[in-house]
Amino acid sequence: LDISEALYDRLNVYYFVEGHALNDKPRLASVAAESISQSLAKNNNNTSQALMSEKEILEFLNGNEGRLEIENALRALNQLGVHGIPKFIVEGSTVIDGAAGPDTFVRIFREIEQRGKVEGTAIFKDILGVDEETLSRGSYSRESLLMEDAS
């Protein structure tokens, strides 16, 4: 999950800050391979994981692997009425517009707090095959964010 989050962050900078096109597959493959290598080095992960090389990433981008999962994810978003970004999806069903004010988020999270539990699950859990351990661990912990700020 750390690698995917780092790749997501890098692709946001690649597109929104550096202004590169997301359909430039050779450049995208290079950036993705570099990001993965840096994440592994940062996490001191020297194991021989089954990671994709730049060539393999480019082959993936040019192929159809993962197409069914993407189509299913788009279908799920469409059923929720999500047709643009940014959006937040809470409990797998509550859609909040990215421009919503803090009072909207506070109200929703207070309702969850009063219930004492989260109902529903992550919208893409089953579509993408995310296991329970990964889901319960989450992507960013408070500690990991503090460590990033310190470095």
Image: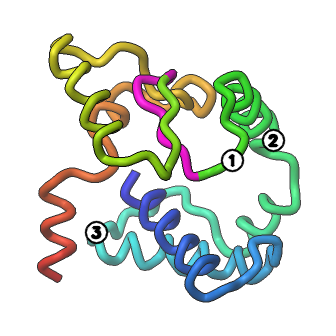
- CA–CA distance in space, label 2 to label 3: 30 Å
Q: What span is colored magenta in the figure? A: 86-93
User: Is 1 located above or below residue 82 in the figure?
Assistant: below
Residue 15 placement, left or right of 34:
right
Which mark is nearer the camera, 3 or 1? 1
Q: Give the residue type that dot 3 points to.
A: Asn
For the C terminus, which image quadrant? bottom left
Q: Residue at image x 20%, y 63%?
A: 145
Q: Give the residue type that dot 2 points to.
A: Arg
Q: Residue at image x 46%, y 28%?
A: 122
- CA–CA distance in space, label 3 to label 1: 34 Å
Badge 1 density bin: few <14, some 14–19, many ≥20, Cα 10 Å: few
Using the image as rendered, state which of residue 144 and residue 85 is in the foreground. Answer: 85
Q: Which residue is mark 3?
A: 43
Using the image as rendered, state which of residue 3 and residue 149 is in the foreground. Answer: 149
As for residue 151 lying within the magenta part, the answer is no
User: Is 27 located above or below residue 86 in the figure?
Assistant: below
As for residue 92 lying within the magenta part, the answer is yes
Question: Which is nearer the N-term, disc 2 or disc 3?
Answer: 3
Residue 9 placement, left or right of 86:
left
Q: Find residue 7 and report its horizontal and vertical position in percent.
A: 51, 66
Question: Which is nearer the N-term, disc 3 or disc 1?
Answer: 3
- CA–CA distance in space, label 2 to label 1: 20 Å
Q: Find residue 63 and report its horizontal and vertical position in percent.
A: 87, 54
User: Is 105 located above or below residue 140 in the figure?
Assistant: above
Using the image as rendered, state which of residue 36 and residue 67 is in the foreground. Answer: 67
Badge 3 density bin: few <14, some 14–19, many ≥20, Cα 10 Å: few
Q: Find residue 83 and report its horizontal and vertical position in percent.
A: 72, 40
Q: Which residue is mark 1?
A: 84
Which numbered dot is residue 67? 2
Q: Find residue 142 and report its horizontal and vertical position in percent.
A: 16, 54
